[in-house]
């Protein structure tokens, strides 16, 4: 089955710096890779996703890159702000089979003013 | 429109009692998922419904856990003879399932279960 590893587990940056979170996956047939942000005590919310037919996707300060050959994908946050502080989860899914998202273990991002 | 809703938001029970957790997906979403999140941990897949059928029950931790979905809408997760290790936040998500490669899963607020 699919296995997703996520690094780092914690990340501290100064406001305005960039943050990068990396994930690797094991199933080469996985073709959908979402990123969720979970603030303390709240539900996970999708912030960006990428499908296997593209290598990069951007949405304002957030971008995701996908390297299918190496089976890894990354979340990039530029010009970080204190409100970016949260736990970020990556996930992978192989459509066509069971619709089961396999999540990484999460990265706690702390942005200090 | 309304998002995914779950009830109760909090549930405290005694060890050995049965509990039922409810999920109301977004209207029209055919797929429904249950996840478990232990304190400070990631999301653990439990079960997936497509319509009223559950093609993937691989994540259910034991036979004390069961789930059903009726009318292609509301789902109930039942935990029998609860144990302290069942304490966690149980999250439900739903998705539309029309794309060829993945559909956004929208999460509910979760039910925090505490087993004393």
Image (spheres, coloured by chain):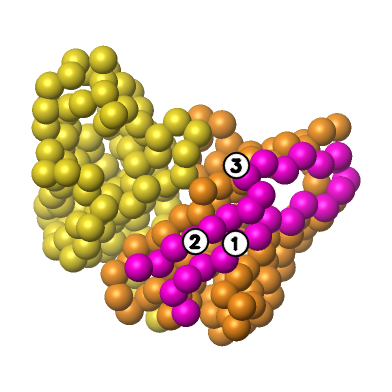
Within the magenta stretch, is there residue A75? Answer: no
Q: Label 3, label 2: how many angstroms apart (C-alpha)?
A: 16 Å
Image spot of residue A107 (x, y percent): 62, 46
Residue B51 visible in the displayed image: no
Magenta-highlighted residues: A1-28
Question: Pointer 2 indicates a residue of which chain?
Answer: A
Please tell me the colour of chain B: yellow
The residue that disc 3 covers is A87
Per the rendering, the mark at residue A4 is 2
Residue B16: which quarter of the image?
top left
Image spot of residue B61 (x, y percent): 23, 45
Q: Secondary structure at mark 2?
A: strand
Question: Pointer 3 indicates a residue of which chain?
Answer: A
Say few, some or many: other residues with alpha carbon within 10 Å of mark 2 (under 14 / 14 to 19 / 20 or more): some
**Side (left or right) of A30 relative to B56:** right
Q: Residue at x 77, y 39 (%)?
A: A12
Do pointers 3 and 1 mark residues of a single chain? yes
In the foreground, A97 or A84:
A97
Q: Secondary structure at mark 3?
A: strand
Say which chain is orange.
A
């Amino acid at each position: 089955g699919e296995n997703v590893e996520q690094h780092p587990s914690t990340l501290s940056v100064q406001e305005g710096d960039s943050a990068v979170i990396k994930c690797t996956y094991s199933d080469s047939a996985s073709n959908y890779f979402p990123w969720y942000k979970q603030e303390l005590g709240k539900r996970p919310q999708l912030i960006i996703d990428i499908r296997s037919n593209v290598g990069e996707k951007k949405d304002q300060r957030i971008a995701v890159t996908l390297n299918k050959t190496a089976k890894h994908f990354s979340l990039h946050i530029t010009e970080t702000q204190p409100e970016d502080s949260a736990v970020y989860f990556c996930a992978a899914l192989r459509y066509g089979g069971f619709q089961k998202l396999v999540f990484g273990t999460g990265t706690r991002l702390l942005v200090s003013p | 429109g309304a998002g995914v809703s779950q009830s109760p938001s909090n549930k405290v029970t005694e060890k050995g009692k049965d509990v039922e957790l409810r999920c109301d997906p977004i209207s029209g979403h055919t797929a429904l998922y249950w996840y478990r999140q232990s304190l400070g941990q990631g999301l653990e897949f439990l079960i997936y419904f497509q319509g009223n059928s559950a093609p993937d029950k691989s994540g259910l931790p034991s036979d004390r856990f069961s789930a059903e979905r009726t009318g292609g809408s509301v789902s109930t997760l039942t935990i029998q003879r609860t144990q302290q290790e069942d304490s966690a936040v149980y999250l439900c998500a739903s998705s539309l399932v029309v794309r060829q490669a993945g559909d956004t899963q929208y999460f509910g607020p979760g039910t925090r279960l505490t087993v004393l």
